[in-house]
Image (cartoon, helix red, strand yellow):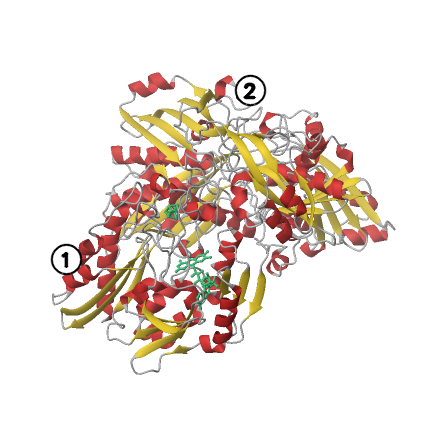
Amino acid sequence: MQPFDYVRATSVADAVRAFGAAGPDTRLLAGGTTLYDLMKLGVETPAHVIDVNGLRELETIDTSQPDELVFGALARMSDVAADPVIAGEYPALAESLWRAASQQLRNMASVGGNLLQRTRCAYFRGGEPFACNKRAPGSGCAAQEGIDRGHALFGGSEACIAVYPGDWAVALAAFEAQVDVEGPHGPRSLAIEALHVEPGRTPDVETTLAPGEIIVRIRVPKTPLGRASTYHKIRDRESYAFALVSVAAALRMEGDMVAEARLALGGVATRPWRVRAAEAVLRGQPFTPALARRAGEAALSGARPGRMNAFKVELGIRAVADALSIARQRG
Amino acid sequence: MNMMPFADLARVDAHDKVRGAVAFAADDARPNLAYGAFAVATIGKGRLASLDVAAAEAADGVRLVLTHANIGAVASAGFIMGGGYGFQSHQPLISPEIAYRGEPIALVVADSLEAATHAAALVRATYETAPFAVELDAPGVEVVDQAETPLAHFIPPVAAGDADAAYARAPVQIDARFASAPQHQNPIELIACVAEWQAGRLVIHEGTQNAEAVRHGLAAALGLDAGLIDVVSPFVGGGFGQKNSLQGHTVLAAEAARRLARPVKIVVPRAQLYHLASFRPANRHHVRLGADRSGRMLAAIHEAQAQTSRHDLFPGEYATTSARLYGIADFRGKDELLRTDAQTPGYMRAPFEHIACFAFESCVDELAYALGIDPVALRLANDTTVDAVTGRPLSSRHVGQCLERGAAMFGWERRSMAPGSMRAEDGGLIGWGVAIGTYAGLRAPAIAKLKLTDDGRVEIRVGVHEMGQGVRTALAAVLARKLGIAPEHIVAIIGDTRAAPQHLTAGSWGTATAIPVVEAAADALLARLAELAPGGVSNREPAQILRAAGLPELAVEVQGKAPGQPDAIYDRLKAGLPSIGGPVYPEFVTYSYIAHFVEVRVEATTRRVRVPRVVSVADCGRVVSPRTAASQVRGGVVWGIGAALREASEVDPRYGGFLNADLAEYALPVNADIGAIEVAFVDEPDTRFNSAGVKGLGEVSMAGVAAAIANAIHHATGKRLRELPIRIEDVL
Ligand SMILES: Cc1cc2nc3c(=O)[nH]c(=O)nc-3n(C[C@H](O)[C@H](O)[C@H](O)COP(=O)(O)OP(=O)(O)OC[C@H]3O[C@@H](n4cnc5c(N)ncnc54)[C@H](O)[C@@H]3O)c2cc1C
Ligand code: SF4
C-alpha cells in the first residue's frame, strides 16, 4: 500500500471542494470495505483519501416520504436491511443487502460505496503476472482462456468479461432507483441503470461518474411492486459469497394475472442487468410455473457463455422461475 | 486400569480462548519488533535475471532487504520425508532459481508492517523463464512409481494375495475413477513466527505442530548448534498439517533477526500462504472392486496418482488406507507421484484417508446398488478382525458397532433404497448416505516430566502440541483422575523444546503418544508418594503427603514409545526427526474407525445441496476427553463437507500457482452450511495398543464424510459423482 494523505470532510460541499483541489488521484472513503481491500491489493493507489464518514446529512434512511424511499449514501447496509419498512414492504431491497458479504462487513459498508464495488475477477485482483485490461489497459484478458466460472454471460466485450459483483444495485435496477450526485459542476441525478457501463473497449471505465462527483443519496420510487418481491441469490455456499446467479423479481398481481413485473439479474453480467424482455413475457399473463420458466428463458436468452460458466444459463432460468414464485407468494 | 469412561470435562483453555488471552505467535507484539514482508515470484518457473531492491531499501522505515544475493551461508534444512526438517527441501532466497509462482524472492524487514509491505511491492525483478507444468496431465509432468523410491521402505505397496486374478474372476465388478482438486488448509492463525536472539540464544515463537523440527531445521539451515535454539509453541491457531515442519519464512526471520539484533516477526498474508506452505495435492484414483453375488468382497485394486513437487516426493498412502476398510484377502495398491512445478504438497487433515475413503466407499455403495443390498448390511457383512494386508490380528476394531449405533441414531431403517424415492415437503430430494472411514493407529516416543509441589500444583512437561484438538484438556483429565486432584491445579508445559523433546504432533498420534506416558508418570509419582507415606495414601491429596514428608517437591520422568520400536528411537526424537511407529506392530495392527450417516437435501429446482444432519460414531479406543473429542469429530465432519461440496484451489496452467488465494474466493464452508452433527463414541479401550487404551481420532473424523455425502447425493438424485468438490453444476 502506498502512502497517502488523509482528510476528513466536514460537509458534502467541503468534500467536493477538497476532491477538486486534490485532483484525480483522490478517493472518497466510506466504509472502506472495498477501498482498503483494493488498496492492499495495489489496485487502488490513491495519493489522497477524503473520509466522508460522520457527514450526518448522508446517513438518512427516510421511508416517510409520500412517493419515494430515500437512502443517504452513508447509510450502512445493515441498517437499511433491518429497517422495518424496507424489510416488510420491499423485501427484495432488504434481501439484496443482508444476503451480501457478512454481518461485520455490512455494519461497515455504506449503500453508496456499495454501488462502486469492483469485480471479483481473480486476474484483476491478483495483478502481476495476469493479463487484465481492466487493471492494466491493453494487457489482454486472462479470464477469456482461463478460469471463467464466475464471469459474465451478458454485456462482455472482447476486452473484458468481468462480472459486476454487487447485489444491491441489481435490486435497485429492478425498482428504477435514482442516484443523486454532487460534483464540481453542481448536483445531478441519474437512473441507477445509467450509473454502470459495459466494458466495451475501456473496461477500466466502470461508471458514468465524473472525477470529483460524490454520490449523496439513492431514491427509490415507492411502488406496489415492493411487497411481492424477492432477491433470490444462488451462490457456492449459504452465506458470505458473491452470487453465481441472482435475481431481483417484483410483481404486481391483479388476481391471478401479472399486471406488472420487474426482473434484474446479478452475477451474470458486466453491470446490473435489467431484463425487460422477460418482464414483457409476464405482463398480462396468468401466473403459472410454466410462465415463470418462460420468463427465465427470455431473461437468459442471448447469453454468451465461456468455458466454465455455461451452467449458469440453465441455473439462471431456474433461479428466475423460483424468484418469481417466491415473489408471487408474497403478493 | 480404571475401566470407567472419562467424565465430560470442559475445555481447560476455553475461557482464555474466548477472552483472547491465549498467546498466539501471530499476535505477538513484543517491544522493538521489526516486521518482515515478502516480494514473490510472478513466473511459473525459471531464474531471476535481475533483482532491483534499491527502491525497497530506500523506503521509509526499511532496515533490511534479504535476497539470494546477500543471504550468505543459509542452506536448505531438507524435506521432512527425505531425512530433513522442512515441509519442502526448496528454501526460498538461497539461489536465483524460481521453482514455482508465488515463491519469495526478497524479504523486506522494516519498523512497521505497513512499511515492510509497501517496500516489498517496490522490489523489481526480471526473469529467465522456463517451461512449467502444474496440472496432472500437463506435458512435462514426470510420473514416479512410489514403489521404486526410498519411500517404499516405510510405505510398502499393498500386495495381498493375487488381486488381479481374483478380480478377473469376481462375478460382480465395480470399476470407477475418482478425482479431487487441490485444497488448502487456511488456518485462522496464519503462518507466523517471531525470531529473537537473546544472549546468544535464538528463541522462536511460532504456532507449529513440530517445535523440535523447527529447532533442528534452523540449526541445519543456519549452521547453528541446536542446543542454542529454543522453539516455543504453546498454542497453534489451527495446524491441520500445514504447520507440521520447518517453513522457509522461519529461517529467514531468524537470519534477519540476527543481522538486525532485533526481534523479527513474519506473518505470511493469506494470499501468500497459498504458495509458502503445503496443501492437499491434486489426486485421482482408479478403483476396481470385485464381489460375489452375496456381497462378499473378494478382491480390490486401488491405483492412485497424486501431485508432488519437482524437488520432493510427497508420498501417497491411498491404497494403504482403502485396504484396511474391510477384510479383502486379495488387494493390490499402486501409488504414483506426479512431479509438478509447485511447492511440495503435504499432510492436510486426513491427507490420504479422506480421499481414499471417498473413492473406495463410493465403490462400496455402487456395489450395494449393483446387488440390491442395504449399504449398512453390506458393510457389516464384510467386517473383519484380521488385517488382510499383513495377516496380523487387529488390536481392536469396532466399526460394526459404529455402523449399528449410527444406523439406530440416524433412523436408517426408515430409508427406502431406490434413488430419488425420498422427498421433502418442499419437493426437494432427500438422500441418505453412509460410509465408513479408517485411519492408522500411530504412536511416537515421548518423554514426560511430572512434578508435584507442596502447594498442590502439578506440572507436566511432555512432547505434544496444542492445536485446538484439546490435548491440554486431555492431559488435565487423565492427571486429575489418576492423582485425585482438581484439573485447575495442573499446568501443562507443551509445544516447548525447553520442557521436553517435542515430536511432531500430527497423524492423530498425539493422544496415544502423550497420554500413556503421562499416565505412567502419574503412576510413578503415586508409587513414590506411597513410599513417603508408610501409613498409606488413601484419602490424602498428593500435596498433603508431600508436606507431611517435609518435601517441597517431587519429580519423576518417564519415557515411552510404540510397541517394537528400538531404544534408539529416543535419539531420533531428540534430533527432531519423525519417529512414528505403526500401524503395523510386531504382534498386531491398529486402526481407528468411524461410520458417518449423512442426510442431504437437493433443492428441486436450482439444486443446491444442503447437509441438514450428520450422525458420526467413532471407534478411537478410550475417550479421555469427551468434550474435545466430540469437537474433533464435528470439526472433521465440517472439513468433510468442505472437501466434498465446497473447496478447490484453482489452478491456471498458463500462470502456475493458485488463483483463488483468499477467504472470499476459496469457498470454505460457513456456519450457515452446517446443520446438526450428532457424535457418539464406542469408547472401548484398546489396551493392546497402549496402556491408556487410546487410539487416534482427529483424522479419522474426516475420513468417509465425503463418500457418505456423495452416496447421499446418489440416493437423492441417482447421479454418481466422482470428482470433488461436487458443485451446483454437477447436480443441475
Ligand atoms: C469479503 C467481502 C465479501 C463481500 N460480499 C459481497 C456480496 O456478497 N454482495 C455484495 O453486494 N457486496 C459484497 N461485498 C462488497 C461490499 O458490499 C462493498 O465492499 C461495500 O458495500 C462497499 O461499501 P463501503 O462503504 O465500504 O465503500 P468504500 O470501500 O468506502 O468505497 C468503495 C468505493 O466507492 C467510493 N465511494 C464511497 N462512497 C462514495 C460516495 N458517497 N460517492 C462516490 N464514491 C464513493 C470509494 O472511493 C471507493 O472507490 C463484499 C466485500 C467483501 C470485502
Ligand atoms: S475479465 Fe476483465 S477484469 Fe477479468 S481479466 Fe479480463 S479484463 Fe481483467
- Per the image, label 1 sits on a secondary structure element best described as helix
Residue B46: give x, y in percent of width and height. 52, 29
Query: Residue tagged by mark 1?
Result: A290
Where B16 falls versus B69 (above or below)?
A: below
The amino acid pointed to by label 2 is Pro
Query: Residue tagged by mark 2?
Result: B150
Query: Whole-Å distance between the Cαs marked 1 and 2?
Result: 64 Å
Q: Is residue B392 left or right of residue B726?
A: right
Q: Is residue A116 left or right of residue B34?
A: left
Residue at the spot 60% in from the left edge and 54% down from the top edge: B11
- What is the quadrant of residue B565 in the picture? top right
The subunit carrying tag 2 is B
Alpha-carbon neighbours of circle 2 within 10 Å: few (<14), some, or many (≥20)? few
- Per the image, label 2 sits on a secondary structure element best described as helix
Residue B634: give x, y in percent of width and height. 48, 49
Residue B684: give x, y in percent of width and height. 52, 41
Alpha-carbon neighbours of circle 1 within 10 Å: few (<14), some, or many (≥20)? few
- What is the quadrant of residue B672 in the picture? bottom left
Where A31 falls versus B397 (above or below)?
A: below
Residue A163: give x, y in percent of width and height. 35, 52
